[in-house]
Amino acid sequence: MKDPVFFGEEEMNMNIIPVVSMEQASKLQDGQLPSVLPVLPLRGAVLFPDTVIPIPVRREKSIQLLNEAYKSNKLVGAVTQRDPKVEDPLQADLFETGTLGRIIKIIDLPNGPVTAIIQGVRRFNIRSVDIVTPYLMAEVDYLAEDLSAIGDVDMAAIVDGIKTSAMRIIKLSGNISNEAGYAIRDIDDNAFLVNFVATTIEIEDPLDKMPLLMTASIKERATLLLKLLEKQTEILKIREDIQKKVKVEIDQQQREYYLNNQLKTIQEELGMDSANDDINQLRKQAEGKNWPDYVAETFEKEIHKLERSNPNSPDYTVIYSYLQFMVDLPWSEATEDNLDLKNAQKVLDADHYGLEKVKERIIEYLAVLKLKGDMKSPILCLYGPPGVGKTSLGKSIAKALGRKYGRISLGGLHDESEIRGHRRTYIGAMAGRIIQSIKKAGSVNPVIVLDEVDKVFNDFHGDPASALLEVLDPEQNTTFHDNYLDLDYDLSKVLFITTANNVENIHPALRDRMEMINVSGYLAEEKVSIAQKHLLPKQLKEHGLTSKDLKLSKKAIEEVINEYTRESGVRSLDKQIAKLCRITARKIAMEEELKNTLTPEDVREYLGLPTNHHDMQKGNEMPGVVTGLAWTEMGGEILFIECSVSEGKGVLSTTGNLGEVMKESATIAFQYLKANAAKIGIDPKLFYERDFHIHVPEGAIPKDGPSAGITMVTAIASAIKNQCIKRHIAMTGETTLRGRVLPVGGIKEKILAAKRAGVDTIVISEENRRNIEDIKDIYIKGLTFKYVATVDEVLNFVFA
C-alpha cells in the first residue's frame, strides 16, 4: 500500500509539516548504526520512527550540522529541547531520548529559513555529550521497539479508538488537511499508525508527546496516545462551544460595524480603486482611436462586462488583457510613404548589390502608389539559395518606403494558432503572430517579412499554410479574422514579403497567390564587389576597426571566395571576413606586428589550410564518366555520372543515394539506348550479355530529379563504346523514351556552378534557350551553349 502525503502545522509559529514517507525507513543493521551522532536540537517538534517531517532551521550551528551531515552519511540525532526558548542548548536542555534521522533533502528558500526534510529511523538514548563545538556530538545507545503485543485483541481496540479520535480532531481542527484522514483510514500497520498519528495530530503542548517516544512498547505507546487524543478532543470541543457562544452574543449593530470595516479592508486589498483607474484609463485610450463602428461596439460591450466583474476573478484579467490589446492595436494609424522614387532606388542600391528584379518591382509599386494615391500592397515571394540577401532585403524595402518593419520566422511552424491566434476560452490565449507583429510595429501599413515560408509543416495542430492563404490573398485579407481578436482586421495595407529556398515545398494554392521573384546566386566578381562595398565595412564597424587597420586586396578576397567558401550567397564569405577582423583585432590588442593590407598569402596564414573542396570538371578523361549539372537549395552544383560495364545478363543497377525520379531517369536512358542501339552504332547483343552499373559519387548526399537524363544516356553510351566524350563539357536536361530532350529549371544556378568548375561548354535543351537569353551577359561570359532537341544530337555532339 502506498502511504499518502499530507500537510499540517506545529506550534512555535513554525510550519512543521509531517509527511508520511512513500516507503518506511529502511532498517539499518546494528553494525551500521553510528555510535556517535551529531545532535540536532528540535524546538516544539518530536520526530518518531518511520515518519518524515520538514524541520525549519535558523541556528547557524544547526545549518552547519545539516550541511556536513548531508555530505557524509546523512544521519543526525534529532532530540527535542525541554525549553524551546533556549537558543544554545546543552545536554541538560535536551530530553534524554531522541530519534536517529536520515536527511532526505535540504531546502534553502530565499526569504525563509533553511528547511531539512528528515525521516525517522530508530530511537536512542543519549549516553554522553563529548563535543560541544561547533555543534553537539553525543554517544548514544539505540533502543529496540517492543512489538510483542501488536496482535493482541485489546491492541486492535486501542487502534480503532485512535483512528476515531484522530478523525474527530481533524474535523474539529481547521489546521490539518483532510488528506490526513484518508491516510489514517488506509494505514494497516498498527505500529506505523501510532507513530504517524503521534506526529500528525496537534496537541496543546507538543512536549506532551515525549512520553510516547520514550515508551518502548507499541501497545503502551498507543494507550498513551489515545489518552492524549481524548484530552485534545475535549479541548477542541470546549473551544468550539466558546466560539459559538461568542458569535451569538455579538449584536446586530456590532455585526454590521464589523462587516463594514471588513468590506472596506477587502476592497482595498482587492484593488477595487485601482480597477476603476484601469477602466478609466482604457476609456481614455479608446477616445483617441479612429476605429470602425463594429470595433467600438465590441469595446463598449466588453468594458461593461469588465465593470461588472470582480477584479480578483480570472475573467477580469482575461477581459482586461483583451481590451488592452484592442486599444494597443493600430486600426487607422499609418506611416506616410516616402514616394521619392530616386531616393528609394538609392537606398535599395546602397544596402544590396544586384537583385535588379526585386528593386524594379518595388519601384513600380511606388510609382503606381504615387500616381493613384492608394492601391493594395503586392505579395512578393523572394526565392533562391541561402545567403543572397532575401531576408535583409525586407528591412531595406521598409527603409526605402519609410515604413515600420516586422519579421516572422515560419521555419518549423506547425501550429495553425501561431497564425490565427487562440480563442479566448483557452488559458493563456494570445493573438496570432501576424496581428502581434502589426501591434508591435504600431502602424497598419508595415513591411512584414514572412521568412522561410517553404519550411511550414502541418500536423494534428492544423495546417499553417492553409491559414496563410487568407493572409496572403489580396482579395481576402481585407477581413482577416484572428481567433483571439475575434474581429475582422484589414491587412491589405501591409506589404508582405515572403522568402523561400525551394518553391516546390510551398503549398500550391499559397504559391499561386504570390508574385514569385527569383533571387539567384552571385558570380565571383559580384561577391568581390559585395565584400568590398558591404561586408568588409560592416565587419570593421562590428569589430571596432577602421579601414586603416585592415584592407583586403581584390586578390585576397578572391582567395577567400575560391578557397574558403562554397556557396551561391555570401553568408560564409561574411563569416570568413569576420574571422580576419577578429585576428586583426587580436593582433592590435596584443601589440603584435600587423599588415594593414592582406594578400592571398596572408589570407592563408590567417585562415589556415583551404577548406573548399573543388568539384573541378576533370575533362571527362575516362570512358563512362560524364559531368552533369544539378540544382540544390544551396545553389548550383556539378555532379559526375559514372557508368561501368561488366559481363552479365543485361541487368541495370544504380547507387549513390538516388531518389525515385533519378532512378527512373537511369531506366529511361538504358531503355532508350537498348531500343536504338543499331542506330547509335552499338551492338544490341551487348545489352543482353553485359551488366550496367550507374553510380553518382558522394553517396551520403540524397539526389533526385529528372535533369540528369541526358547525362546518364551519354555515360552509358560512353562506357559501352569505351570512348571518352569531349573535354570541358557539362550537360543538363530531361530525356524521354522517344529521345526528346526536355527543359529543366535552375539554369542560372547551374551556370554559376559550371563556371566555378571550369566548364566551357554546356549542353542544354533547345527549350531552355529563352532562359539563357534572359540572363545577363556577365553570367554567361566565357561559356558556349549547345542547344539540342533530341538525344541523338547530344551523342553526335559529344562523340564528334
Image (cartoon, rainbow, N blue to C red):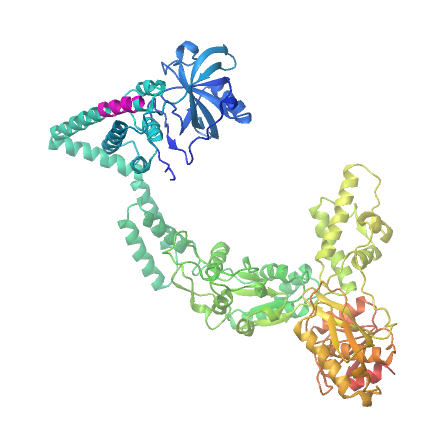
Q: Nearer the viewer, residue 103 or 767?
A: 103
Q: Nearer the viewer, residue 416 or 319?
A: 416
Q: In the figure, is residue 70 to the left or right of 732? A: left
Q: Main secondary structure of the magenta part?
A: helix
Q: In the figure, is residue 646 to the left or right of 704? A: right
Q: Is residue 790 visible?
A: no
Tell me: residue 239, above or below residue 494: above
Q: Nearer the viewer, residue 538 or 674?
A: 674
Q: Nearer the viewer, residue 786 or 488?
A: 786
Magenta region, residue range: 220-231
Percent position of residue 570, x then y? 72, 59
Percent position of residue 615, x then y? 80, 64
Does residue 103 show up magenta in the picture? no
Q: In the figure, is residue 415 to the left or right of 669? A: left
Q: Is residue 454 visible?
A: yes
Residue 54, quarter of picture = top left
